[in-house]
Image (cartoon, rainbow, N blue to C red):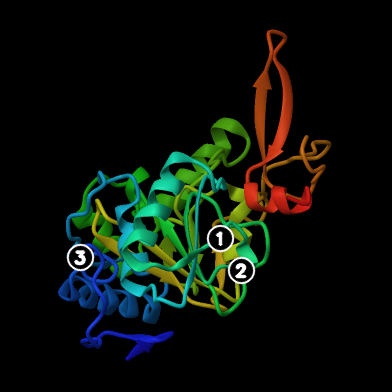
Amino acid sequence: MTIGEWSVGSPPQEPRFGGYSYGFLDEGAKREIRRKTLKAVAIPGYQAPFASPELPIARGWGTGGLQLTLSLILPEDVLKVIDQGCDGSVNAMNIRRFVSSLTGVALTTDTTAATVIQTRHRIPEERMRADQILVLQVPYPEALREVEPSELETRRMHAEGDYARMWLHLYEDIVRFGEVTISYRYPVTVNGRYIMDPSPIPRWDVPKLDRADTLFLFGAGREKRIYAVPPYTRVEPLEFEDFAFRVEDQAGNACVRCGATDAYLDEIIAGADGARTYVCSDSGYCDKRCGR
């Protein structure tokens, strides 16, 4: 079985970089991750457990996403890594250098030029294509953790489709505050079956998951879970008939650099007077609009 150009079987002998195998991970670890990735793709929204090997970065800083990237990347791929939409953050730059030093793949900050994009908490503004893969770093993969602390019980709830407590949680939010106040990690239903945590992306990005052309892979290294949203899969945010899901209201705001009004904007408070300005969260998209 294959995804793209790689298989779950033993690949041919690969070049070694500084004494490490191609992509750092040993072949047994890669096969394990690829098998579980195939299972996750076959069952959209299902959290497939996997044996997470040790990596030279702390758990919680992207080990799950990094393992997915290292297990599927090929020499001809072009890699882009972003952190909160930014290509130049410490996390993004370190991961990018690490993967490049062990694979030799080309690097880019242009979303349209990349074949594999690893991201922490954002989906690029530019629409992605069917020949691209988006790998999301996930700190907390369990969408039901807010309503049920027991892992055993959440497994049962997923198996039986028992999501009453999640719906009650949203209802109580509306009763107390007049609306659903979840700003990120907004729970979604995948393919009409599993409730899934889309990672800590803002609500602005949730509609991009629905029936997209791209394969979305979610990796949680600390929790040892992999799950996926295959292309053209229905992804629906939880909502009530009289309280529909809505994205962040950014009416009247524009990026101070490129003037964009149709992108997710970060608010910046600067100066002693507390003046507010806004800038595109997706730095690559902003740079492209600025002609850089």
User: Residue beneath label 2, please?
Assistant: 113
| First of labels 2, 3 by sequence position | 3
Q: Amino acid at mark 2?
A: Ala
Is residue 7 placed above or below 181 in the rendered structure?
below
The alpha-carbon separation of the residues under discs 1 and 2 comes to 7 Å
Residue 277 lies in what quarter of the image?
top right
User: Residue beneath label 1, please?
Assistant: 108
Q: Nearer the viewer, residue 145 or 250?
A: 250
Q: Nearer the viewer, mark 2 or mark 3?
A: 3
Q: Specify the label residue 116 is tagged with.
A: none
Q: Position of residue 91 (x, y in %)?
A: 41, 44
Q: Residue furthest bottom?
A: 1
The quadrant the N terminus occupies is: bottom left
Q: Amino acid at mark 3?
A: Tyr
Is residue 274 placed above or below 162 in the rendered structure?
above
Taking the image as shown, residue 17 lies to the left or right of residue 103, namely left
SS assignment at label 2: helix
User: Residue beneath label 3, please?
Assistant: 20
Q: Amino acid at mark 1?
A: Thr
| First of labels 3, 1 by sequence position | 3
Taking the image as shown, residue 121 lies to the left or right of residue 53, namely right
Residue name at image x 17 percent, y 55 percent? 54
- Do we see residue 161 in this rendering? no
Whether pointer 2 and pointer 3 mark residues with C-beta atoms closer than 8 Å, the reply is no
The alpha-carbon separation of the residues under discs 3 and 1 comes to 24 Å
Residue name at image x 15 percent, y 75 percent? 28
Residue 181 lies in what quarter of the image?
top right
SS assignment at label 3: loop
